[in-house]
Image (cartoon, helix red, strand yellow):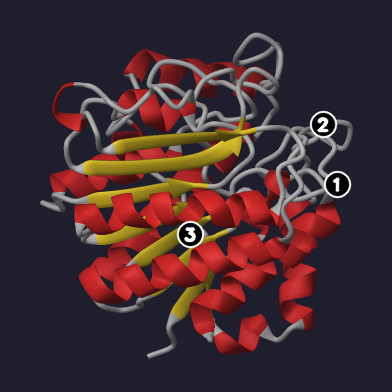
Amino acid sequence: MIPLTIYAGPDLGRYGFGAAHPFGTDRLDAFWHEAVRRGLDRRATVATPVAATDAQLLGFHEQAYVERVRRQCAAGVGYLDYGDTPAVRGLFQAAACVVGSGLAALEQMLAGATVRAFVPIAGLHHARRDRAAGFCVFNDVGVLIEDLKRRGIERIAYVDIDAHHGDGVYYAFEGDSGVYFADIHEDGRFLYPGTGAREEQGRDGGAGRKLNIPLAPGADDTDFARVWPEVEALVREGRPQIVLLQAGADSIAGDPLTHLRFTPRSHRHAALRLRAIADEYADGRMLVLGGGGYNRDNIAATWSDVAEALID
């Protein structure tokens, strides 16, 4: 069995907001050109993206919101939030493809058809159940977690190393005892969305099973290595049945929207260490979601390093 499935294709690449927007539709191509140069297309299974159904979207999102996105994107008018996420024509279908590709990857892993999977245009961690936010229309992570819970998966590890705090995931599952959440991000006092303080450690049944690690602007690989053992400790405590990693490349030095200074080595390290934990507890099952990243060279190098870590 080839150990990694990568979801890539035009339908997935269409998620974006135009050439003038940081989240453009060229992001998938930036990664894929480098992936092919490294031969990753020959060392992994390349799968066709799949669109989620309305019923699947409603596993996390409210019906009124899903209908609003469909209607507003058909018209291509206005914003889906306060001004970051334009209602572009065709965006509903592209956003559904982001969600559906992750669900297809889960289906393949749980059926034993693949061990690990990577969906590069995914990890839209800001969207809430009833609204868009921060370039994120549908929260694919939220849909995936709810789907896993319905399938009887009781212990899920979600690790997020995007520069922005994964607020849409954190607050949706803040009180969920089965979701072990760890997020390394730029301090919210300096960067959107302004959340993810150290003190936010979950509530009710989820208390103590959530870890937020804000880092100061300019934090680098040394800082990442210093705090990473905390992430591993929490994930191991959860003995996860599946591991999810949001590998946003906007925490790499040189991103135009953020101020962290990691190199792709930190992301490769995270992928390798979480892969080892998945092998130990979850029969290898690990799903990586590309997340943010607005410097195309960083996207290419970082996501290719992560994919290699899942293969080699």
Q: Residue at x 79, y 60 (%)?
A: 30
Please state if 211 lies on the left or on the right of 251 as rendered: left
Whether residue 283 is visible to the viewer of this picture, yes or no, is: no
Q: Nearer the viewer, residue 189 or 297?
A: 189
Q: Looking at numbered disc 1 in the image, what kind of residue is underneath it?
A: Gly
Q: Which residue carries the number 3 mark?
A: 288
Q: Residue at x 34, y 59 (%)?
A: 243
Q: Please tell me in which quadrant of the rendered image residue 180 appears.
A: top left
Image position of 58 with respect to 236: above or below:
above
- Choose the circle earlier in sequence order: 3 or 2: 2
- Choose the circle earlier in sequence order: 1 or 2: 2
Circle count: 3
Q: Looking at numbered disc 3 in the image, what kind of residue is underneath it?
A: Val
Q: Which residue carries the number 1 mark?
A: 254
Whether residue 299 is visible to the viewer of this picture, yes or no, is: yes
Q: Residues within 10 Å of mark 2 (few under 14, many from 20)?
A: some
Q: CA distance from mark 3 to mark 1?
A: 22 Å
Q: Residues within 10 Å of mark 1 (few under 14, many from 20)?
A: some
Q: Please tell me in which quadrant of the rendered image residue 283 appears.
A: bottom left
Image position of 96 with respect to 236: above or below:
above
Residue 25 at what x, y percent from top left?
Answer: 76, 45
Q: Residue at x 52, y 28 (%)?
A: 126
Q: Looking at numbered disc 2 in the image, what kind of residue is underneath it?
A: His
Q: Residue at x 52, y 82 (%)?
A: 311
Q: Which residue carries the number 2 mark?
A: 21
Residue 140 at what x, y percent from top left?
Answer: 44, 41
Residue 106 at what x, y percent from top left?
Answer: 32, 60
